[in-house]
Image (cartoon, rainbow, N blue to C red):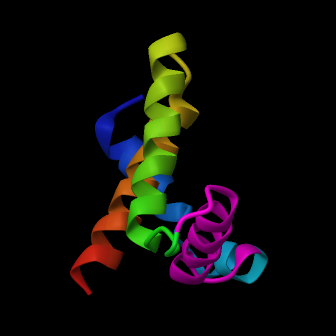
Amino acid sequence: MEAVDILAEASCLLTDTRMETYGSFWENHRRIGVMWGELLRLEESIPAETVAVMMALVKISRIANDSTHTDNYIDAVAYLSGAGELATN
């Protein structure tokens, strides 16, 4: 798979269709951050952009196990691009 194909697939994960299913990227990751913060008994929730980076790390860990599974690269790129948007807006 070419790098541009990975980027194209990742961009499809940030579409309106996905938002209809899961809610906006920001809202979904904000909600996860609240839940993780409560589970870990933190005084504050985990910021949405940090959640997205942590999700990318899950994918990177999976790549360490099987570097040929392209889905992990696609998802990691999508999570990191979403994290970048959240952190810079």
Residue 1 can be seen in this image: yes
**Farthest bottom residue in view:** 89
Task: Tell me the quadrant of the picture where the C terminus can be found.
Answer: bottom left
Is 26 contained in the magenta span?
Answer: yes
**Image position, residue 73 (x, y; %):** 44, 36
Taking the spot 54% from the left edge, 65% from the top edge, the residue there is 42
Q: Is residue 29 left or right of residue 88?
A: right
Taking the spot 64% from the left edge, 76% from the top edge, the residue there is 31
Task: Tell me the quadrant of the picture where the N terminus can be found.
Answer: top left
Taking the spot 68% from the left edge, 82% from the top edge, the residue there is 23
* 69 up-or-down from 43: above or below: above
**Farthest right residue in view:** 21
- Please tell me in which quadrant of the rendered image residue 36 appears: bottom right
Taking the spot 40% from the left edge, 43% from the top edge, the residue there is 5
**Image position, residue 87 (x, y; %):** 27, 75
* 48 up-or-down from 66: above or below: below
* 29 up-or-down from 4: above or below: below
Q: Which residues are magenta?
A: 22-42
Q: Name the residue nearer the viewer: 8 or 25.
A: 25
**Image position, residue 69 (x, y; %):** 56, 22
Q: Is residue 50 left or right of residue 61?
A: left
Q: Name the residue nearer the viewer: 53 or 18.
A: 53
Residue 67 can be seen in this image: no
- Magenta span: predominant SS is helix
